[in-house]
Image: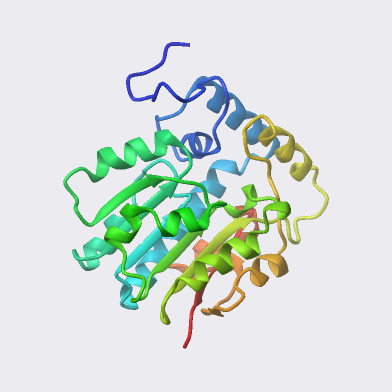
Amino acid sequence: MQRPDWAPDTIDIERPSVARMYDYYLGGSHNFAADRTAARAMMDAVPEAPLMAQANRAFLRRAVQFLADAGVRQFLDIGSGIPTVGNVHEIAQRIDPESRVVYVDVDPVAVAHSHEILSGNDRATAIQEDLRRPEAILHHPEVTRLLDFSQPVAVMVVAVLHFIPYADKPEEILRTLRKSLAPGSYLVLSQASDDGRGETGERAEAERVYRRTDNQLWIRSRAELTALFDGFELVDPGVVWVPQWRPESPDQAENAEQSVFMGGVGRLGG
């Protein structure tokens, strides 16, 4: 397969990437044949996969709008993925041009395209780092250059936790991030869940598809996701299917469990 000009030489274009599969679900063009093959296999197993991705992106946009309206002006988006319409900086800086945003992703394609989009924007940047290395994120020079952790920061971990195994102790990762935050900061989480969906066989097939990538799936329940907000006060309506989180209209929350993603927003008091 011919390597396009935008693909860094360091990446294996024959191995699917979860970020590039997600890009494909959202109708993006920064993906390879291996990504598309894996994504189509996922869609065969779970036909709602593109709608799931769209519902999750819509949740992210509504959460950022809520946070910006609440006065948050600093955002740390971990696992940000390949840039698409409705990025965090677009929403936040529309409300206040002084808003500052740092995108973090482990995928070099995602980071490279973020840099391209953010060229000339001195209040937003992107770094390549792994959620499982929270200290490295917090002490990265670009993070400390843009974000002032003595003031409220919104940390966004959206559609990422289902790639973090229990062995990597996601609760400790989030605790490390929380300890760096000032009162009035927020945590936004979402991840895949099969609560109430019954034994459809979709979970086993989805897990099989993602074993082709560097990231296996770790599905969690509503109770498990709620527990990861330890130390934060959940904002109404709590942890729900993402279309149910402050929908713009009632019909957007219909058949919400088909989104597969659950999410919520928590505020750090003090």
Position of 206 with respect to 26 (left or right) is right
* Residue 258: image location, x then y, percent: 64, 54
Please say which color scheme the image uses.
Answer: rainbow
Seen from the viewer's position, the closer of residues 104 and 260 is: 104
Which residue is at the far top? 1
Q: In this view, does 156 lie to the left or right of 95?
A: right
Position in image of residue 245 (x %, y %): 52, 69
How many numbered marks are there?
A: 0
Residue closest to the eye, 217 or 150: 150
Q: Give coordinates of residue 230: x percent, y percent.
A: 62, 75
Q: Residue at x 49, y 69 (%)?
A: 187
Q: Is 216 drawn above or below residue 256 in the view shown?
A: above
Depth check: give the residue in front, 247 or 91. 91
Q: Residue at x 46, y 46 (%)?
A: 129
Regarding residue 111, the answer to whether it shows in the image is yes
In the image, is 251 to the left or to the right of 44? left
User: x, y (%) of residue 247?
Assistant: 47, 68
Residue ID at (57%, 65%): 174
**Vertical order, 69 against 44 (above or below):** below
Residue 253 visible to the viewer: no
From the viewer's perspective, is residue 94 above or below residue 185?
above
Image quadrant in which you'd find residue 229: bottom right
Q: Residue furthest right?
A: 199
Q: Residue furthest left?
A: 120
